[in-house]
Amino acid sequence: MGVPGLAISRLCKRYGPHTVLDDVSLTVRAGECLSLVGPSGCGKTTLLNCIAGYVRPDGGSIALAGRPIDDVPEHRRDTAMVFQSYALFPHMDTFENVAFGLRMRKVPKDEIRRRVLAALQMVRLEGRERSYPNQLSGGQQQRVALARALVLEPKVLLLDEPLSNLDARLREAMRFELRELQQKIRITAIFVTHDIQEAFVLSDRVAVMSAGRIEQVGTAAEIYEQAATEFVVTFVGPSNAFAGKVAALANGTADVLADGLRIRVPRDARVTPGAGVSVYVRPERISLTDRPTRPNSFPGRIERIAYLGGWIDYLVRVEGHLVRVQTVNHGKPIAVGAAVRIEWEVSDGICHLDRQSTERSATPR
Amino acid sequence: MTTLRSLVTTNVFTSASLVGRRHDLTPVVLVLPAIAVLAALFVLPLASAFVMSFHQHHPVLGLRTEVFTLANYARLGDSYHLGVFLRTIKISGLVTAICLIVGYPIAYFCSTLPRRAQAVVILGYLSPWLVSVVIKAYGWMVLLAENGIVNGLLLRLGLVDEPIRFLYSEFAIALGLAHAYLVFAILPIFTSLVAIDRRLLQAARNLGGTRLQVFRSVVLPLSLPGVVAGTLLVFTLTMAAFATPALLGGGRVKVVSYLAYEQALHLLNWPLAAAIGFVLMLVTGLVVFSYQRMSSRLLRGVAG
């Protein structure tokens, strides 16, 4: 694989009693786009600011393309940032904004001209060289900010929620455009967002952060299908949670008794009989049937319906549980009060040991 | 009682419905008192002074309101009056330059302080205005007189053999004015400096700018509106300043405002004094206008 694009090891940052980054280690491959996602205050922006050099970490180290940059001042780091607010210079036109970094580096005039025009072409802004930021739309300003960063050919591109100021439709279009551009020029990029779908579309891998720690790093499918912690399960999408105890083990699966339901789930090696576990099932993986066809099949009654257009959400009362089921809208919604069966594949269950049992099993006896 | 209440409620009702409709007169009503005061105490006297400036002052007969003449304005074109006008512009220009050069670093330093400290520093620079202009001028006289503190120090240190004549010079006037009006340069510059988005500076650093480069290419241009405002304030205020130049110039080094005062109160030549006042206003307005024309090109994109 060669030298990683960016290697972060054991980074810590505290503000007073507040730990913002708690022993964060992360490797970004060269040419890879990695998303940092998490709720606000999880430390993702602080991590980005540490990489850019605005924030000095209390401990740990950052290496860019194999070279430690901990002592490199912010203006010599070769990290180009695209800001959430774009931070375009209002007194400079598009050309001058993009040329700024090159001028700071005293690049010869005709080379500046050539590179700026190339960068503007890359973000499809030819012909707007003489427009000032306040004459551009939000999407165009976004492109100028991108061109201003890319023109420097940085070792890593840092994007701080760059799409959050755009309206919903433009945001979706820009997701794909950004992704295409990143893949075309194979630049190492770190993309900060709180929108998990944006992260999924835009990046090769996603790092989910919470309370200053990285909870899980993986591809979109890994994060969604094999969420490693309870936080990741709930952060990346809605899910039904069943708390219970392991009743029996079989080959690769476990049966969990959860308040009247016997649920079969895939298991890892740590699951032992009697252990307290939580089982998570995503609403779109549950189907409504009238005859049992799979191991996880339970009778219930429709209690509420939410009509969402393209799909329909049902809340189904099953024993003591209220289970959310999401189905594609085929045009024949089931009436409230109707008796139904809910079913899901064994492999669609995510089984986590409860924290107490994890701690107990980790304690040496 | 009931009628009163119904009157009140009706009024509230009508004004409320006015707010919602097309013609909301509330703002107009609210500025009426201010307009009335301005009209009575500023526009009217100005108009009467304007008329006055075309009358004649006769050495024997005194004020002759039946005469209409341009002679007062013509007199201001002679070398003496022209000289006073040029000196006034020169002093104001110098004071403005001093205030900008001294005030900018102060404003910049202040903008980097925490919020509370900013207020304290600004208050400190405003504090000379707690003292009357006249007292301030006397203060400078105590410092700059031939037997004053500065000369005493210079003599004692052996730096000069005889006292330097600081007072009653353009230098003394400029010094006194610069001291008094410095805060009018600091305030607008400070305001435009703190208005600069910190992220622009972060971005500029991230793009490879050294601190000096970031200052030159981002901070300075973005603070220009404040510099322009400060220039205009200090220049117009010092052009019209009277007490400070009168005391520190001592009637020997005259500025335009002193000239008008002399004509109006010593020589009782009101028409000439009025003409002087109007030409001063015109000259100041012209300088301000051309400066603004010039600076609007500089401010392209900054204000927008």
Image (spheres, coloured by chain):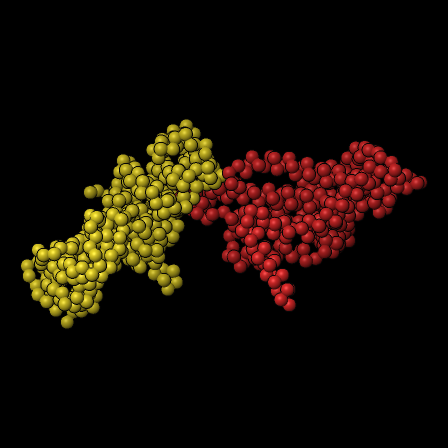
Outermost front residue: B3
Residue drawn at the location 57% of the way across and 36% of the way down: B296
Horizontal relation, residue A59 to residue A216: left or right:
right
Q: Position of residue B285 (x, y in %)?
A: 68, 38
Which residue occupies the foreground of this view, A122 or B56? B56
Asked which quadrant contains residue B292, the reply is: top right
Horizontal relation, residue A363 to residue B187: left or right:
left
Say how many tags the image has.
0
Asked which quadrant contains residue B6, the reply is: bottom right
Which residue occupies the foreground of this view, A300 or B176? A300
Q: Position of residue B188 (x, y in %)?
A: 59, 48
Chain letter, colour red: B
Outermost bottom residue: A365
Q: Where is residue B16 in the image (x, y as percent from the top left)?
A: 56, 55
Q: Is residue A363 visible?
A: no
Asked which quadrant contains residue A33, the reply is: top left
Residue drawn at the location 84% of the way across and 47% of the way down: B265
Horizontal relation, residue A353 to residue A192: left or right:
left
Which residue occupies the foreground of this view, A322 or B159? A322
Residue drawn at the location 67% of the way across and 43% of the way down: B235
User: In the displayed structure, would residue A358 be above or below residue B152?
Assistant: below
Chain letter, colour yellow: A
Residue drawn at the location 49% of the way across and 47% of the way down: B196
